[in-house]
Image (tube, coloured by chain):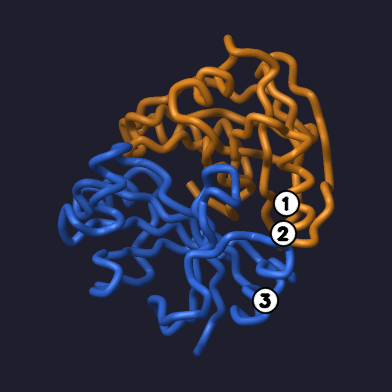
Chain colours: A blue, B orange
Amino acid sequence: MLLREVDHVGIAVEDLEAAIEEYRRAFGIEPAHRERVEHQGVDEVLFGVGTSFIQLLGSLGPDTPVGRFLARRGEGIHHIAYRVDDVEAALAALRDAGVRLIDERGRPGSRGTTVAFVHPSAMHGVLVEVVQEGR
Amino acid sequence: MLLREVDHVGIAVEDLEAAIEEYRRAFGIEPAHRERVEHQGVDEVLFGVGTSFIQLLGSLGPDTPVGRFLARRGEGIHHIAYRVDDVEAALAALRDAGVRLIDERGRPGSRGTTVAFVHPSAMHGVLVEVVQEGR
C-alpha cells in the first residue's frame, strides 16, 4: 500500500470558535473548509498547510468519539490521516498484514472523501485514518 | 508566517525496534533516516510519506521529555511539526501574536535542521514544533 501524503492531523478542541481564532492569529491562516459530520458527531474545520490539512474537531456532545476523547484526555491530537489512492485496497493490505481495523469497509468522510479507521491498538496508541479523495 | 508543509508527526513508542517492524509490515515502508539526538534524549526514525515524515520516537531514559510523556500518557502522538522557511522569523511572528513559546531561539534538530517548540498551552494541548531545513 502506498501512503501518498499526510492528509490531515485531527485535533480535538473544547471550543471550536476560539480555536479557529487562535490558529488564525498565531499562524495567519484562514479556514479552507468547514463541515458538520453528524454521523461522526463532529464539527470540523480544515486549514490548508501545503499538501496537508490541520483539522480542528469540535464535539457535538459528550457521547460522541471526540466528546469522550476530550473527557478522558483533554484537548490534543486525536488522529493522523494518510491519503491513499484506494481505501478498499489499503484496507485489504492492512488486513493481510494482520492489522486490526475499526472499519472493514470505507465510509463517507468530509469533503466528499471515503475514509476508514485503523484500531489504535495496532498502531502504538495512534488512531490512524486512511482517506481517499472522492467516492 | 507561512507554514509550508507538515514536516512530520512525532509518535512516542515504548519499543522502537518493534514499532519500526510494525510500520514496515503494516504500510510496506522503509525508514528513510535514523538518528540519536542526545540532548533531546531520543532515538528517532523517519519514514517518508509524500512531502512529510512519520517520526517514531524512542526514549533514551525515563527522565527525558519522551520518557515522561510515555509514563504519563502512554504511547501516542507526541507532537506535530510544521516546515517553515525561517525559524527565527516564525518565532518572531508567534511572539508578536502573543503565543507562548518553549524556545525563544532556534536550536539544532535532526537531519541538520533548525527547530523550535511552541508551548502546548498556546495550541490547545498540542506540542507544536517549527522546522527549518538547514542551519
Disc 2 crowd, CA 10 A, few/some/many (<14, 14-19, 20+):
many
Residue count near mark 3 (Cα–Cα under 10 Å), binned few <14, some 14–19, many ≥20: some
Look at the image and tell me whether residue A4 can be seen. Answer: no
Residue B122: image quadrant is top left
Q: Are marks 2 and 1 in contact (CB under 8 Å)?
A: yes
Q: Nearer the viewer, residue B120 or A94?
A: A94
User: Tag 2, which chain?
Assistant: B
Q: Quadrant of the C terminus of chain B?
A: top right
Relative to B92, residue A18 above or below:
below
Instruction: Count neighbours of disc 1 (C-alpha within 10 A) and say few if under 14, some if 14 to 19, many if 20 or more.
Output: some
Q: Looking at the image, can residue B115 be seen?
A: yes
User: In 3D space, how far apart are the residues under numbered discs 2 and 1 (Cα atoms)?
Assistant: 5 Å
Residue at 25% over, 56% down: A58
Disc 2 to disc 3, C-alpha distance: 11 Å
Q: Residue at x 51, y 51 (%)?
A: A120
Residue type, label 2? Ala
> What residue is drawn where x is 83% and y is 41%?
B33
Which residue, given by chain and number where applicable, does mark 1 sit on? B23
Identify residue for label 2. Answer: B26
**Which residue occupies the extreme left position in the image?**
A61
Q: Nearer the viewer, mark 3 or mark 1?
A: 3
Q: Image quarter for residue A84?
A: bottom right
Name the secondary structure under disc 2. Answer: helix
Three-letter code, disc 1: Tyr
Q: On the same chain: label 2 and label 1?
A: yes
- What residue does disc 3 label? A92
Hey, which residue is sitting farthest bottom in the picture?
Answer: A135
Q: CA distance from mark 3 to mark 1?
A: 16 Å
